[in-house]
Image (cartoon, rainbow, N blue to C red):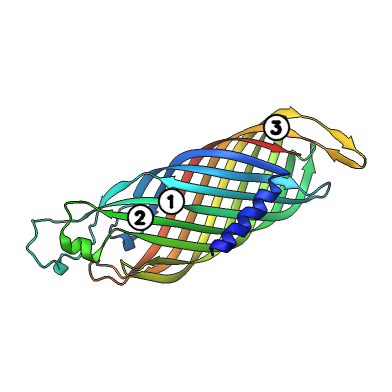
Amino acid sequence: MRKFIFLISLACIGTSAIASDFRFGQGQFSIESKIFGTTEKVKEDVTTYSLAEEHANFLKTNIFYGYDITWISSRKEEKYLNLYNTSVETLPLPSGYKPLMKYELQGLDAQIDLGYDIINKDKKKTYLSLGGIFGISVPYVKGYNNKNNSNDTKSYLPDSKTKISTYRLGITLRGAYTIFKRFSMFTSVTYAYQTGKVKNEYWGIDTTAAGNYMNFTAGIKFYLFEYEKKIWKITLSPRLYLTAGYKYDYWILKDVKVNNIALNINKDNLKIKNQVGFLGIGYSF
């Protein structure tokens, strides 16, 4: 798994010598699943760092590629476990006792796109493209006990990580339109089938699950610098640009199982939503 992530990262960094966009994003993500002991969504502020390329062509062909490698890091949020099974406690509890947990998400999401331009003009700045995608996601959710939780709670639901790893295959539709000479807008929609594994050995979670992935991205691009230079039979078009936009990701894994008598739940769907606004600076040749 780690070797595979490294190879994808290496391949994308290699293509970044041709085109690349460095993005900083902030927004909010939410996790929704009863396997974490609560019926409420866990919502947290999130920061993202990305190396991305929305669309670039191989030489003068209509074949395009794209990629996105994003690191996600969130703050911590506390939630009461309203699905806690108090019958596991060995000592009398205060009336209405509910354990309090803190949750935090971090992880990597990476995707490679490859396809064909149905429309390509304005020096490749206006296009409509259809392609296939392959992606991986390897986030993990950290859970921390509140100091006031009982010893039994800390024993059955100790501080730990819920590790999630998914692989996805799907299709993407991408488009861009030049509004002015140096200003354009872009958008993309992606849908994929995914399969993955969710594991937290301390909480009794170890299951393979299938589901879906969806993405919507929209933004604007402003070219600070454009230049064309022909060297022998090769035309170079170096460009320096700024980007700003919005990105929405949605992952769902169905029927994730949990085997822990301290929780009044044995399986549930796992849903993760990530919404960020981003700013970036990029270059291409």
Mark 2 or 3, nearer chain start: 2
Give the residue at mark 2.
142
Task: Tell me which amino acid carries mark 2.
Answer: Lys
Task: Tell me which amino acid carries mark 1.
Answer: Gln
Which residue is found at the position 9% from the left and 60% from the top? 93
Number of marks in picture: 3
- Residue 267: quadrant of the picture: bottom left
**Residue 177 spot, x, y in % from top left:** 70, 37
- Residue 8: quadrant of the picture: bottom right
Task: Tell me which amino acid carries mark 3.
Answer: Leu
Instruction: Identify the mark at residue 106; answer none if there is no mark.
Output: 1
Instruction: Identify the mark at residue 147; answer none if there is no mark.
Output: none
Cα distance in 3D space between marks 3 and 1:
31 Å
Mark 2 or 1, nearer chain start: 1
Instruction: Determine the secondary structure under disc 1.
Output: strand
* 236 relative to 55 in the view: left or right: right
